[in-house]
Image: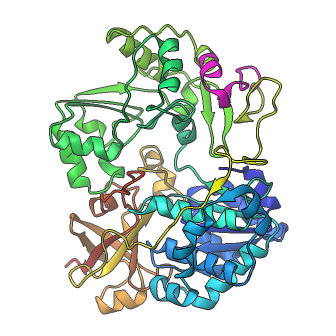
Amino acid sequence: MTNSISEFETADTVFIIGSNTTEAHPIIGLKLRRAALFHGAKIIVADPRRIDITQVAKLHLRQRSGTDVALINAMMNVILAEGLEDKNFIAERTEGLEDALPAIKEMTPERAEKITGVPAENIRQAGRMFAQADRASIVYAMGITQHSHGTDNVKALCNLAMLTGNLGKEGAGVNPLRGQNNVQGACDMGGLPNVLPGYKPVTDEAARKVFEEAWGVKLPEKPGLTMIEMLNAAEKGEIKALFIMGENPALSDPNLNHTRHALDQCEFLVVQDIFLTETAQFADVVLPGASFAEKDGTFTNTERRVGRVRQALTLPGQARQDWQIIQDLSNRMGYAMKYDSPRQILEEINQLVPQYAGITWYRIEKKGIQWPCPDTSHPGTKFLHQDKFTRGKGKFHPTPFLESAELPDKKYPLLLTTGRQLYHFHTSTMTGRVEGLEELCPGGSVEINPEDAAGLEIMDGEKVEVASRRGKVEAIALVTEKVPKGTIFMPFHFAAAPANMLTNDALDPTAKIPELKVCAAAVRKVA
């Protein structure tokens, strides 16, 4: 997030797109509700489904899933046509608008209406509301990124923020909500195939040299593979072994038949987790890790805040803290690690990662600090890009509209999208073991619009088969107007009705993120 969670309550307008915030991020959802109910913020929600946060929204745009770029470009078309852009911000702090203009100018609200299904007048209203706000914030999540053109979705949102001068100030910004705990921290520490800790490119010789001297090893010069690429390579026999830590791709990845076959093809599979997950059942070796309540260390949350984690429970059985497992494996494989505590690891981070330099163990004893924090006298950074962007001037990018990799047809006439529900988390590895949550939300359902259900002679509560080009699953039909005609929705939490048996593993060419949010599907009643 460029800005802080608390700033949502200071925003004049919040544009929520691709985020079922109150269910997937309930604490932030409460902040957004407060912003609307008690601080006068105008909420714009762009989501095909009638999600909970729309109850406090001034405007709900029900775009066809996969058409976000067309919607965002059309909003910018309105802003430029009506002279609502921030001319001073554009002139002083940005470059490249001319390159982005063709895609924006061709996407009139009328053309966008035909693509997205959102009435042109509603698009105009959204563009005006966003541009006329003194402080407008953008909130998005994986409903934006998990597309074959997810990178363009994000770039279009950044264009919208720059066009209206909503970066580098309180209550504004582009704010992606992280999908799991400490995803931000994992990325900060180089948990990506193309960067070192602190987002230094592995292709940067000077950056590699810093870490090579600190660690006493030669580092690779080329980026590695993303998760989906690794599984593809494993299926082909190009990768022989995998180490999977705290992840459950056998339920969370798209095209599960392919994913599970790839896991089965591995000559040696190690899974480190706290439960015997669906993925762990494929493993040759399972290493029992520690839960958040059973270890010491730090987490970095979605607003870049680094906070202390303290062990509250004794480790059960043979479970061990994750850093100790990794250190022992490293030592046995020939690279000596000699850390004696998470504090010592953070001290090394302070030395090697400039954004974390001032975030010391004792400074975050009582309250976390937001990076970048360059030294111990720095209070941390509430919002980014106040005076300038990291690259100097912010760059506009051309974002022409592209359709999703797979669209409905005669055989698969419905559009399937997936997401989360309030009572369960990710693949329900933990929440699925809580009896009360299972009673509140047993899962295994598919939402279908009443018109579609009537045409298929499906009644609410009946068992149906949902099929795509990749597989079939059985689920219970929930006939509801929460989803628009032509769209069905399934939560991906549940092994009993694994939505990702159906989803598409087509990748965004830049970020290599799979298109989990759009695929063609068919539904029929099960006799």
Q: Seen in the image, is 507 located left or right of residue 144?
A: left
Give residue 61's position: percent from left, percent from top. Answer: 58, 80
Q: Residue at x 73, y 28 (%)?
A: 374
Q: How many marks?
A: 0
Q: Is residue 143 visible from the viewing direction of this image? A: no
Above-or-below relation of 195 to 154: above
Above-or-below relation of 164 to 28: below
Q: Is residue 142 visible from the viewing direction of this image? A: yes
Give residue 447's position: percent from left, percent from top. Answer: 41, 75
* Segment colored magenta: 347-364
Give residue 289's position: percent from left, percent from top. Answer: 43, 26
Q: Seen in the image, is 224 located left or right of residue 266?
A: right
* Residue 134 among magenta residues: no
Q: Seen in the image, is 101 located left or right of residue 32?
A: left
Q: Residue at x 28, y 64 (%)?
A: 502
Q: Nearer the viewer, residue 223 or 383?
A: 223
Q: Residue at x 25, y 78 (%)?
A: 412
Q: Residue at x 27, y 78 (%)?
A: 523
Above-or-below relation of 338 to 293: above
Quadrant showing the C terminus: bottom left
Give residue 64's position: percent from left, percent from top. Answer: 46, 79
Q: Seen in the image, is 246 located left or right of residue 398?
A: left
Q: Nearer the viewer, residue 116 or 422?
A: 116
